[in-house]
Image (cartoon, rainbow, N blue to C red):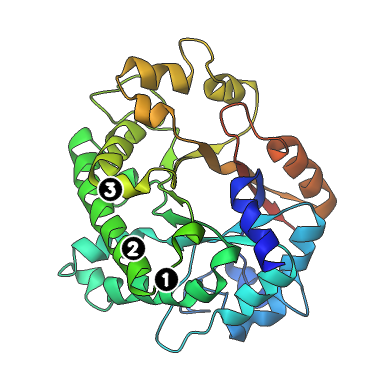
């Protein structure tokens, strides 16, 4: 089963974004302050949500998902995620693990007030060490989420370029951590750095939706040639529909993402496989409706997203 899961990374991902909450945290909204100290609910303490009990992982597998994307994952300090990874293998659901925005930021800004209590380097290394025995079940590393907007009320091209330096340091540490634990080269997970399609933040591609990709990805490919074959162009798309399909078609019209990247002199970015790291909405829906939406949005992939997508919805229980 583990060897079979390895092929999932090279096929069409058809997954859900998975940011669960215990039932007793919902009265004050998702993750209300003071109820739980962390939104990392993937340790053995919360097995009744995703394992035996509520059985979220098995349920998502039955709904048609072959992967889940997580947002909170803090290894070390006595946290044990191994039961979650074992449950994912049992459910035939691969896991896209996050290097979240705070880890990316605090790795480069350890002196900042919110970062003084967080050893970002140790946390990233611990995540890699913890995931290594389950290499076949890791669908991807997701480094940041719309990091071009992190900490900025009004992001600018200059602030995006500063964020680029943070991402480079995070990628450098992630690659070093993989090497340190002896991750088999043939099982190294893909890596993606999701950017929002709602921003225009590049001098090189000023009219391109998601133009932060024009800043991030060329520099990552130039600095880390070993990422060739691993880097995926991650897009936060939110709502599916014909406009999104036109944007992602290859070769597509002059306004397609592929054509605009080529026009900007970025053939190496245009050639990257595309993964929709979020597509959909957070409107409440039933499990049956979520299964239908997942199939409609992700099965077979968009023309420009052959790896498929992670569907974003709020499933009521």
Residue pushed farthest right? 288
Q: What's the CA distance linking mark 2 and mark 1?
A: 8 Å
Q: Nearer the viewer, mark 3 or mark 2?
A: 3
78 sits left or right of 20 in the view: left
Is disc 3 in contact with disc 2, using a CB cutoff of under 8 Å?
no
The answer to whether 209 is drawn above or below residue 36 in the figure is: above
The picture places residue 278, in percent across and down from the top left corner, at 56, 44
Residue at image mark 2? 174
Horizontally, is 283 left or right of 132 in the view?
right
Give whichever of discs 3 and 1 has the lower sequence position: 1
Residue visible at 25% across and 40% down?
222
What is the number of the mark on residue 128?
1
Q: Position of residue 29 (x, y in %)?
A: 58, 64
Question: Disc 2 vs disc 1: Cβ atoms closer than 8 Å?
Answer: yes
Element type at mark 2:
helix
Mark 1, other Cα within 10 Å: few <14 / some 14–19 / many ≥20: many
Compared across the picture, whether 292 is left or right of 104 comes to right
Locate the C terminus by quadrant. bottom right
| Rendering quarter of residue 126 | bottom left
């Amino acid at each position: 089963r583990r060897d079979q899961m390895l092929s999932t990374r090279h096929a069409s991902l058809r997954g859900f974004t998975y940011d669960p909450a215990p039932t007793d945290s919902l009265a004050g909204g998702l993750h209300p302050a003071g109820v739980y100290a962390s939104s990392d609910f993937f340790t053995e303490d919360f097995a009744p949500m995703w394992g035996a009990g509520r059985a979220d992982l098995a349920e998502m597998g039955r709904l048609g998902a072959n992967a889940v994307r997580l947002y909170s994952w803090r290894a070390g300090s006595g946290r044990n995620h191994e039961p979650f990874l074992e449950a994912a293998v049992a459910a035939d659901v691969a896991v896209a693990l996050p290097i979240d925005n705070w880890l990316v930021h605090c790795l480069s800004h350890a002196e900042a007030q919110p970062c003084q209590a967080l050893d970002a380097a140790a946390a990233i290394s611990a995540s890699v060490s913890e995931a290594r025995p389950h290499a076949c079940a890791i669908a991807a590393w997701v480094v940041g989420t719309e990091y071009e907007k992190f900490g900025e009320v009004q992001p600018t091209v200059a602030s995006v370029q500063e964020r680029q330096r943070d991402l480079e340091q995070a990628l450098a540490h992630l690659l070093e951590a993989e090497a340190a634990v002896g991750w088999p080269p043939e099982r190294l997970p893909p890596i993606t750095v999701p950017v929002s399609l709602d921003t225009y933040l590049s001098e090189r591609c000023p009219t391109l939706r998601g133009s932060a990709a024009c800043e991030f990805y060329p520099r990552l490919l130039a600095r880390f040639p070993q990422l060739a074959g691993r880097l995926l162009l991650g897009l936060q798309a939110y709502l599916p529909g014909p406009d999104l399909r036109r944007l992602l078609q290859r070769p597509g019209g002059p306004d397609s993402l592929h054509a605009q990247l080529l026009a900007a002199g970025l053939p190496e970015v245009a050639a990257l496989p595309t993964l929709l790291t979020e597509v959909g909405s957070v409107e409440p829906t039933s499990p049956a409706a979520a299964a239908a939406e997942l199939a409609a949005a992700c099965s077979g992939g968009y023309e420009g997203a052959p790896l498929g997508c992670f569907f974003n919805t709020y499933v009521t229980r």
